[in-house]
Structures are given as C-alpha cells and as structure tokens.
Image: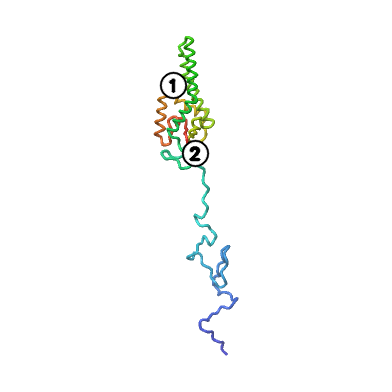
Amino acid sequence: MSAPTPPPGDQNPEQPGQAPDYGQAPPPPPAYGQTPPAYGQTPPAYGQPGQDPNQQYGYQQPGAYPPPPGGFPPPPGSYDAGYAPAPGYAQPATLGTRFGARLIDGLIIGIPLAIIFNVLIGAAVDNGGTGVVIWLLDLIVQPLIITSYYAYMESNSGQTFGHKWLGMKTVQYRTGQLLTFNDSFKRNIVLYIPIIGFIMFIIGAVTINSDPEKRGFHDKLADSQVLKVS
C-alpha cells in the first residue's frame, strides 16, 4: 500500500520543533537591549536600508552631545587691534571721558598744591628773597606729588577720584589686573615733565584718539589700558 501523496505546495513541510536543514546558518542573536524577533521572523540584516547601525548598537549620533560649557571672557585687550570688543566686555574709555577725569583730578590735587607753593613764594619775596628757589622746588616737587597721587590710586583700586566719578578704570593691558605702583608712576610722570608737560599732553591726546583701542603712548609705555566700568 503506497503512502499518501502530499498536496501541491507542501512538498517539504516543516514540522514544529524540527531542526533546520543541514548547512543553514542560524539567525544571529539580537543586539543588546533589543527585543528578539517573533518566532519564524528573520531579524534585519546589518546594513539593511532604513536601519541605522549606530542606533542598533546604542551609539549616539554626531552632534547629539550637549555643547561644552562656555569659556571665561577674554581679558581686556585680548581682542585683535582694530576690532571693537564683543558686547558684554569692557569698552575702552574715550578721549573725552579721560580728559574729564584728568580735569577733575587736577582740580582736586593740583589747585591745593598751587595755592601752597604760591603762598611760599609770596612769603619768600616778602622776606627779601626772590622766590626763585621756591619756584624751582615747585617745578620739580609738584609733578612728583601729582604723579604719586595717580600711582597710589591706580595701583590700589585702578581708579582715581576722576575715574570713579566718570566710570573708568586703569588696568594692565594683557591681564586686566591692577598696575604696579612703578608702572602707574611711569605712565603718568611723562605727562607732567616740567616745561614740556603740555606738549606731552597733546601727544597723548593725539595717540589716544588715533588708536583703535584708545591707548595713548603713555598707556603703551606701561602696557596699560583705561576701560569703562559701570
């Protein structure tokens, strides 16, 4: 008695629990963290269109990482010459503001000194002298006193009284730190040299106005800069 003939289309039926044919590779295991495919479904091959291998293995897409934290603002004077600093950073003080601060400080320290030395000269003349010695002392001592006033104030707070009232501060050009007493003395004494002090003031004004960072020749001499502050 012959065996029944299987119906068409069912020549090699696969029985439940039957092992695959010899030589057929088993399906690859699912990636870590992924749900294994249902029984009888073939997992997508690596590189299959529509499947991102980075997502398959948990890699993060380029550009998806958070941006790095912002850096610290650059020190004063760190921007290139000829370009204004970015908004939010200290701006160079203008020539007019700096002149106003010098005028205020001159009234505070210069007028009392002038009164004192004029009284001394008058007393010397009343006593039969010519007052020449007092005048020479005034010519030398008064610039030293004024320059020492600037050096003391700038090296301790970066601001004279005129600076404070008009919102300015003198600092080191490259670091933004306070000037030393010697550096401040050097940048100011050149403006009060006897006889030629007025000429030095004019040169200072011209170099401040023509410089993109508003640094006069005396500022560059001491590697300093005058900035606006609130």
Name the residue: 42% across, 27% down: 201
Left or right: where 39 falls relative to 49: right
Residue matched to label 2: 75
Q: Determine whether 6 is above or below 108 in the image.
A: below
Q: How far apart are marks 1 and 2 (CA)?
A: 35 Å
> Can you give x and y, in whole percent of width and height, for residue 216 in the image?
43, 31
Q: Position of residue 142 (x, y in %)?
A: 48, 21
Q: Which of 56 and 46 is in front in this view?
A: 56
Residue drawn at the location 53% of the way across and 57% of the way down: 60
Amino acid type at image mark 2: Pro
How is the protein colored in the picture?
rainbow
Identify which residue, 196 or 59, lies in the foreground: 196
Q: Amino acid type of disc 1?
A: Pro
Nearer the observer: mark 1 or 2; the answer is: 1
**In terms of secondary structure, where does tag 2 sit?**
loop
Can you tell which mark lies on residue 194? 1
Residue 124: % across, % down: 48, 12
State the image coordinates of residue 55 (x, y, percent, origin top left).
52, 61
Q: Which of the two residues, 200 or 130, is positioned nearer the viewer here?
A: 130
Asked whether disc 1 touches disc 2, contact meaning CB atoms under 8 Å apart, the reply is no
